Amino acid sequence: MQKELGQIIQRRSAELGGKLITVTTVRISPDLSVAKIYLSIFPPKETDKTLLAVKEMIPQIRHELGNLVRHQLRIVPELAFFIDDSLDYIEKIENLLK
């Protein structure tokens, strides 16, 4: 699912301001009803606007995902997008250790 979501978002990157958006993690609930998707956005300026643009595209992304995984999953989970700030956290720790 991570691979398919990454492909969908890359195809729509022009609509999202031309930023490099990577799907870093996908966590799916045990009943497959909700998928939490963590995105890494580069350059990191205005990530909130980019995340908002992605959230506005959830119906289209979910529809495309449904077409891609219709033979593997019985239902397409609801999608929830979040910013993956782990790289920022790592950079902050490295700066503190210097």
Image (cartoon, rainbow, N blue to C red):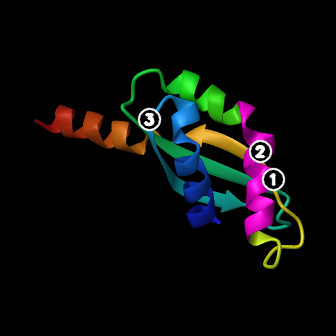
Residue 42 in the figure: left or right of residue 49: left
Q: Which mark is residue 60?
A: 2
Circle 3 residue: 19
How far is mark 2 from mark 1, CA to CA? 5 Å
Query: Measured along the vertical axis of the image, is residue 20 above or below residue 27?
Result: above
Asked if labels 1 and 2 touch by Cβ distance under 8 angstroms, the answer is: yes
Magenta stretch encompasses residue 57: yes
Q: Is residue 23 visible?
A: yes
Query: Residue at horizontal 20%, vertical 32%?
Result: 96
Q: Is residue 29 visible?
A: no
Q: Which mark is residue 37?
A: none
> Magenta region: which residues?
56-68
Instruction: Give, as a three-letter code, the residue at label 2.
Output: Gln
Query: Residue at horizontal 56%, vertical 22%?
Result: 49
Query: Residue at horizontal 47%, vertical 21%?
Result: 46
Query: Residue at horizontal 70%, vertical 34%?
Result: 55
**Quarter of the image with the N terminus in it:** bottom right
Residue 60 in the figure: left or right of residue 26: right
Circle 1 residue: 63
Instruction: Give, as a three-letter code, the residue at label 1.
Output: His
For marks 3 and 1, the one nearer the N-term is 3
User: Considering depth in this image, is 92 or 62 the residue closer to the camera?
Assistant: 62
How far is mark 3 from mark 2, CA to CA? 19 Å
On the image, which quarter does residue 16 sit in? top right
Magenta stretch encompasses residue 13: no
Tell me the SS state at disc 3.
loop
Instruction: Give, as a three-letter code, the residue at label 3.
Output: Lys
Query: Measured along the vertical axis of the image, is residue 5 above or below residue 95?
Result: below
